[in-house]
Image: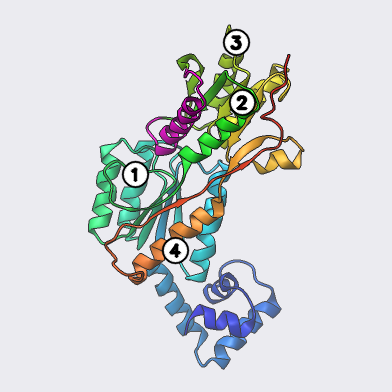
Amino acid sequence: MRIRDIAQKSGVSLSTVSRVLNNSGYVKTETKELVLKAVQELGFSHDFVSKKTKKQHKNKIIGVVIPDITNPFFGEVIKGINKVADNEELNFILCDTNENVDKEIRYLEMLKEHNIKGLIITPATDQNEFNRNYLVQLDNMGVPIVLLDRDIKYSHFDTVFLDNIKGAYQAVEALIEEGHEKIAIIAGPITSKPGRDRVSGYQKALGMNGIHEDEKYMFYGDFRLESGYNLTKEILNMNEPPSAIFVSNNMMTIGCIKALFEMNVRIPQDMAIVGFDDIYIFNVINLNISTVSRPTSLMGEEAMNILMERLNKKGGDNKTIKKVILPPCLILRGSEKYIKK
C-alpha cells in the first residue's frame, strides 16, 4: 500500500495522510477519521502503515542546496521541486549557503552523512576545487546530482540552466533600439556561469550594434541587494553617467531602484533600466520595470524530474549527461524608454 492509495481513497492530499499516519501537525477530526477509515477499508492497520511510511520517508530524502533563500527566484524554484517531490512521496533537506563556499562544503558533508538519495544544487561558485570534490564523492557513492542555474568547473553532472547569454542580449538590444548608447551593466560575480554569461550577452549586444564597449560602464556585484544599491550610487556619481542600466539579477535590481529613488532619479525620464528576473512585488505596486523573465518554477520541476529519472533508472542510458537549457522571455513595460533631455 502507498500513501497515494490512501489519499485517493479518502479524498485528501498526500501531506494530510502523512500527518495523520505520523501523528504530526494539525488535522481536523473529520479529516483524520476519513483517512483512518480508508486505511481500515484498504486492509491495513494504522500502526503498520505508520511504520512503513516512516521507513519509506527515512530512505527517500534528497538534498537541495541553494545560495540565497531570501531571493524570490529560489523560492519559486523550490516550489517546482516540491511539486514533483510531493507526487513522488519524497522529502528534502533544504540548505541555504548564503553564497558562502565554506557553508556549502559543510552542508555537503552533512548531507553525505544523512545518506541522501539525490542532490539538487546551485553552487556558490564554479571555481572552487573543494566543493567539486565533495560532489564527486557523492557521485561516486551513487548519489545522482543535478546542477541548477549554475555550473561547476570540469563537472559531468546533469544540468538545468537558462540561456543567460540570450536573455542579456535581448535586454541590452531593447535599450539600444530605444536609442541608448551609454549603457551600464551591474553584473554578477564572474565566478558563476550566470554572471559570466550575462556579461557576454551584454558585450555581444553592444558589438552587434556597433557600440564601443567601455569598461567604465561595467560594474561587478555579487547578486545581492546591497551591491546593486552601492553600485548604482557609483554610476549616478560618474562624470559621464550612462542613460541606461542593465541589472543582471533581481536582488541587485531592487537595490538599484532603491538607490534611484533615494537620489530622486526618475525611471525612465532620468535613467532607463532593464532587470533580470521578474519581481512580483513591482507588479503589485504598479512599478513597471522591464525584465528578462525565466520559467523559474519549471526549472525546479525539470531538475527534480531528471533526478527522479536517475533514481528510477529511466530515460535510456543512465550515464548520458542531461543538459536542459530553457529560453528567457523579455518583458518590456516602459522602463527601457529613451527620453531625450
Which of the pair 103/170 is nearer the observer?
Answer: 170
Name which quarter of the figure residue 183 lies in.
top right
Residue identified by numbered label 1: 106
Determine the CA span between mark 1 and mark 3.
41 Å
Report the Cα–Cα distance between label 2 and label 3.
13 Å
Q: Front-most of 194 and 182?
A: 182
Q: Amino acid at mark 2?
A: Cys
- The part of the chain drawn in magenta is 190-213
Left or right: residue 259 versus residue 63 is right
Percent position (x, y) of residue 23?
Answer: 56, 72
Q: Secondary structure at mark 4?
A: helix
Q: Is residue 219 above or below residue 160?
A: above
Q: Residue at x 48, y 14 (%)?
A: 216
Q: Identify the mark nearer the N-term, 2 or 3.
A: 3
Q: Which residue in the structure is indicated by mark 4?
A: 305
Q: Report the residue marked by disc 3.
A: 237
Q: Position of residue 78 (x, y in %)?
A: 52, 54
Q: Amino acid at mark 3?
A: Asn
- Tell which tag, 1 or 2, sits nearer the viewer: 2
Marks 1 and 3: CB-CB under 8 Å? no
Q: Which label's residue is closer to the chain start, 4 or 1?
A: 1
Residue 256 shows which numbered tag? 2
